[in-house]
Amino acid sequence: MVDYSVNSSVALLLVNNPPVNALSHAVRKGLADGMLKATKDTKVKAIVIAGKGRTFPAGADIREFSGPGKEPWLVPVGNGIEASGKPVVAAIHGTCLGGGLEVALFCHYRVALKSARVGFPEVAIGILPGAAGTQRLPRVTGLPVAFDMITSGRHVPAEQAKKYGIIDEIVTGDIVNAGIRYAMIMVGKSTIPRRLRAKPVPDAENVQKYADAAMAHVKRKYKGYEAPVYCVKAVRASAEKPYDLGVENEKTLFNVVGKSGQARAQQYAFFAERVVGKWEMPGGNSQTAKPIPVRSTAVIGAGTMGTGIAVCILSAGLPCYLVEQNQKFLENGLKTIKALMEGSVKLGKISPEVGQRAASLLKPTMSYDDLTGVDLVIEAVYENLELKKEIFAKLDKVCKPSTILCSNTSSIDIDRIAVATKRPEKCVGVHFFAPAYHMKLLENIYSTKTSPDTAATVMKLGKTIGKVPILVKSCQGFLANRMNTPYGTESGFLVEEGALPWEVDQVMEDFGMPMGPFKVRDLSGLDVGSKITAEIAKTLGVTLTDETRFMAGNRYSHMNTVLANMGRLGRKSGKGWYKYEKAGGKIASIDDDVITVLNNHCKKLGIERRTISSQEIIERLMYSCINEGFKILEEGIAKRPEEIDISWLYGFTFPKYLGGPMYYANQVGLGRVYDRICYYHENFPFSKHWVPSQLLRRLSEQNIPMSQWMASPGARL
Ligand SMILES: CC(C)(COP(=O)(O)OP(=O)(O)OC[C@H]1O[C@@H](n2cnc3c(N)ncnc32)[C@H](O)[C@@H]1OP(=O)(O)O)[C@@H](O)C(=O)NCCC(=O)NCCSC(=O)/C=C/CCCCCCCCCCCCC(=O)O
């Protein structure tokens, strides 16, 4: 796990624990033993610590957090490094993260390749740096940078890290040789002045000011998350306590936050994100399928989705045709893309060079004939089967035989689009979430004909453009929208039965959703929901009126359309479920007129309003979706619960500290969830989303926890 060798007068401790050289027990022991050997060997004058393969250690082995842990801990190992009288150099390449950066900070010197990145991402997995990182980093960078790095978890490029004082020198060539060369220069120098424990925290007298600002920031930005708060407390102590007491304090805080439900959920989410990359479908999987190389792309449609998708592709450095039917639409689309790219540069999401390069990669056109040579096309027009089929038929004619044809659709069965082509095996769904340039989920959908190689191509493309891609089987609404539908439907029923929209929103925001369901409706527009409902009614042959309570035997609420028909379209009209300071405003306030409309609506329908508890609101919104999630698993639409959880984390901003709805259900207890679903089914027999899932019934009756079902090691942490 740690290869030991001596080169001239320099001992090399090469961590060898693929894939990311995590600091497992064996690695910690290897480092401790290596240090002892090098210290005793009189021929050794300096020591280098480096990582074999792709990276310097990227942190502790997260899987070990579930067990009791085994000595040696990282702090004593680090103390041994720091106490050495022989200079110790960390030679950094790849990602030097978490415990890896802590090891580096125990070393007397740090050199890095320009491509390396350093950081403390612990906060993202619900913990804090637990091996003196919160005490050592502020001594190097000062408090503001330490608060920022530790509470954000961001990866810092080597050159920036040098400016912060974390890296002493940027080196080139082979990292081990560069480390050894640097160590040879340091031979004979005293290590005492390089021991961080003895250094004061710069500007420590202003700690109150920095800590208050950091706390206010994390409470606003990471509402509901415990770890950032603990990180602030730990870093603050670096300026208020002597070093050893600060480390002791950090350990106490680590032990509390590390054992929390939030930490377990966030660690589950970490592994779930990796599990969904190992997909499976009939005829192939991520190991066997071969993605085709995508060197050029096209997006059809320069509307909101098309331009957002084009921005993702261009930001990843891929050429992209943007196709529109007339000059005016094309020009509008180009303006939107320009504005979005400029915004991304301003926000630091992409560098100015990438922004500039993107402009040269964008190729606007009104002719499909330009697309003969592209490798992959994404059609992103509005949800209309006939239009999508027409476009696919045209693309099938002009594009080379190997071109993959994707439809950005949120609900239309891919088989029904693919029939318009002679290459159904190369047709696939790619469901982006709005705003496409921002939301990280990419729901890829295979049809009965999609080939595994086609699926592999869009899964790879998803990663290339910075998304978290999942692969699901085609069905009405696919995974994400199908499962999310009861969330909206039940919220509508709750306000008819007695809850007020802002009460429902408050409960769900306290639960952890960034925005309650009624604020979301106001944001997307009440007319949008109303039109979708009207379409469904049309296909079912139902005439909607203010009194309609059922559609095809299923309970229905017309209240959204009642408000939309009054011109209350949401934020854009200044009124919807809330009122706003102006049309297009963002500040939502309670509107008594809505209560009047609601009361009249209920009177007309003969519904007696009642008091509804927070518990009922959570259960009805979450359990109805969870029930659907189990049906999605039962039908094989999603292979594993992880696909479902990832779709909620990255498509609907479900709080990571709850892991995702399926993980949450497991925490509540499948038996309890099932019992409540049965209860609601009995009380609301006309809502098919309450018909209990058979899979959930089986798991609950046989007392099988979902963690046994999950592929992610995090589920069992
Ligand atoms: C950026 C990455 C490193 C690489 O990304 P990428 O190239 O895309 O590769 P991935 O697909 O993400 O990963 C490849 C595979 O590696 C697995 N992996 C990655 N990181 C880890 C990890 N840290 N542990 C285990 N496994 C890991 C991943 O699952 C993939 O596996 P597979 O192929 O799917 O099977 C990226 O991977 C990344 O960001 N990784 C996470 C980095 C991170 O979060 N680091 C911080 C970890 S926490 C930490 O370091 C904490 C240190 C504190 C001290 C330790 C305390 C020990 C507990 C004892 C408690 C007592 C307290 C006393 C404290 C003391 O003294 O010790």
Image: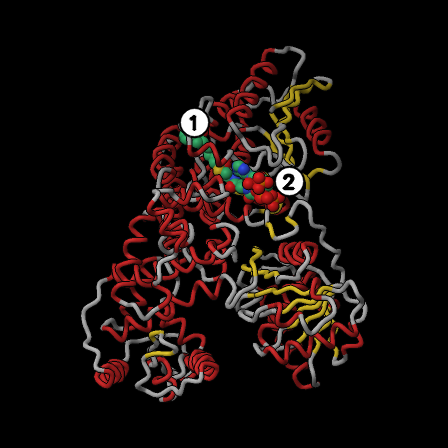
Seen at 64% across and 31% down, the residue is 51
Front position in the image: 437 or 93: 437
Q: Which amino acid does label 2 sit on?
A: Gly
Residue 308: numbered disc: none
Classify residue 392 by image quadrant. Answer: bottom right
> How many numbered dots are placed on residues in this image?
2
- Residue 327, position in %: x, y? 70, 85
For marks 1 and 2 on the same chain, the one whose residue lies earlier in the sequence: 1
Report, in whole angstroms, how far the alpha carbon at label 1 lies from the one at label 2: 26 Å
- Report which residue position mark 1 lands on: 69
- Residue 166, position in %: x, y? 57, 39
Front position in the image: 671 or 7: 671
Q: Does the beta carbon at disc 2 come under 8 Å from ligand 1?
A: yes
- Left or right: residue 665 versus residue 389 is left
In the depicted structure, whether residue 512 falls above or below residue 117: below
Instruction: Kindly state the secondary structure of the residue where label 1 is placed.
Output: loop
- Report which residue position mark 2 lands on: 94
- Left or right: residue 705 versus residue 432 is left
Color scheme of the displayed model: secondary structure
Q: What residue type is labelled 1?
A: Gly
